[in-house]
Image (spheres, rainbow, N blue to C red):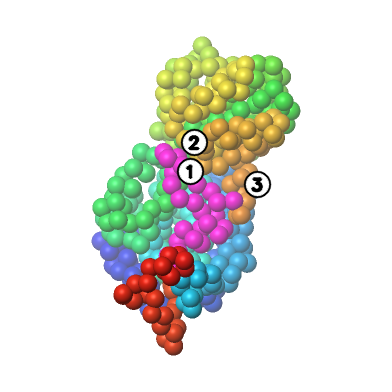
Amino acid sequence: MTALSDTAARLDALEAFFATGRTRDLEFRRAALLRLQRVIRRHEADIAEALRTDLHKSADEGWLCETGMVLAEIRDQLRHLDRRARPQRTGAPLFLFPSSGRILHEPKGVVLILAPWNYPLQLTLSPLAGAVAAGNCVALKPSATSAATRHVLETIIAESFAPEHVALFAGDHAQTAELLDRHFDHLFFTGGASFGRTVMTRAAERLTPVTLELGGKSPCIVDRTADPDLAARRIVWGKLLNAGQTCIAPDYLFVHRDLRNALLERIPAAIERFYGSDLRHSPAYPRIVSDKAFTRLCGYLDAVRDRILLGGTCDAADRFIAPTLVDAPDPQSPLMQEEIFGPILPVYTFNNIEEPVAFINRRPKPLALYYFGDRRSGRAVLRTTTSGGACINDTILHVTDPALPFGGIGTSGTGRYHGRASFETFSNIRSVLVSPRRFDISLRYPPYRMSLLKKLL
């Protein structure tokens, strides 16, 4: 564990190392990313065991949603590093002739990454890859909740980076508060909106730029033109991934009345197909991360017991909650006012598409929106709603494409990352005008010849 008294000295070391200019060198960045890639592969078994301990994730789910995604992000940064870092020449307007413009991507400096517990490897190391690729020094603060994964992260970071280049802080909430007392050149936070407000407030005190990857209530619409078999499989997969503890999990469902019965019949079949008939003993079904989170979710269910269509079973000893469907809970209830972050899915029925669209638009803008049905109708829904990201006839998978910038809007977040977006998030995009010394056009100086200037402008 990192002692609180040591925090300031370690941050000072990051600042001093950045000042040397070493991290600006592309070969230095490339070597650091390659080391991180090798170390992650070396510790794949340790990562899988840690995720199993923290969240009861199967080795396959852990690789699919954590290790594999981090390795894909590192590969993307390595593959495109030269092109992303290369100065871009811009065409100058006639009135600036013979000057020329350049856009430079330079590192911001020392950045802070605050990571959550639900995807403790992916949401720590994916933004780290972008920050290192962009040439920064990094203070890294994983969640204290996922303790086993945090321990593996300490090993990975120690074997991949010099402590003055990337420093991992493994303390508790008190250390997070101490980190937020310091000035950073960028602050990247993934987590809940409540603490996100605190992070943004503290950053604003120092005018620190922020990226906030938050969450919210991501809606899912199953229209009358949807394939109910496909929709059931993909909704169940997206909702039960990590036992619903995913910021972009479908948070509530609108299904057209013509497909309601067909969809509700297929959802239990999809659950059994994925996890077997006895979910309690399924090696693939995750658990709720903590007693506090378990109690919160069971409280939601206790308030709507008369509306449960499927599931509702809770086992405190194992922090197990069965996949649960809830029929049309009160929109003002806590279940529909707060992000669920668990395997509970409220289900509403609609007659025409304007109903779910109006419902969605009355609420804070979600991190994701999912539509099942005709693609043309799906695009029409996207034109009349707003969300950070979206899928048509799928869930979750938009987050896996490095070419698609990921992030929220409004209360679901601000800023984007993944692939090029990560590189740009952690870069200062510097605009430079280069003017030759041998040409000095008199039109720029008083007394101005406005008739000529107006023609040029």
Relative horizontal placement of residue 320, taking residue 185 as reference (left or right): right
Whether residue 362 appears in this view of the structure is: yes
Camera-near label (3 vs 2) is 2
Task: Judge whether residue 430 is colored magenta.
Answer: yes
Residue 444 drawn above or below residue 421: below
Q: Determine whether label 3 and label 1 are within 8 Å by CB.
A: no
Of the numbered discs 3 and 2, the one sitting upstream in the chain is 3
Q: Identify the mark at residue 263; answer none if there is no mark.
A: none
Of the numbered discs 3 and 1, the one sitting upstream in the chain is 3
Where does residue 222 sit, x and y in percent of width and height? 65, 26
Q: Identify the mark at residue 60; answer none if there is no mark.
A: 3
Q: CA distance from mark 3 to mark 1?
A: 28 Å
Whether residue 324 appears in this view of the structure is: no
Of the numbered discs 2 and 1, the one sitting upstream in the chain is 2
Relative horizontal placement of residue 20, taking residue 250 as reference (left or right): left
Relative horizontal placement of residue 384, taking residue 180 as reference (left or right): right
Which residue appears at 46% of the width and 26% of the height?
362
Residue span colored magenta = 404-431
Task: Judge whether residue 267 is colored magenta.
Answer: no
Tell me the element at label 2: loop
Camera-near label (3 vs 1) is 1
Judging by the rendered image, the residue that carries numbered circle 1 is: 408
Q: Amino acid at mark 2?
A: Pro
Q: Determine whether label 2 and label 1 are within 8 Å by CB.
A: yes
Q: Amino acid at mark 3?
A: Asp
Quarter of the image where one finds residue 71: bottom right
Quarter of the image where one finds residue 198: top left
Judging by the rendered image, the residue that carries numbered circle 2 is: 366
Q: Amino acid at mark 1?
A: Gly
Relative horizontal placement of residue 65, taking residue 373 as reference (left or right): left
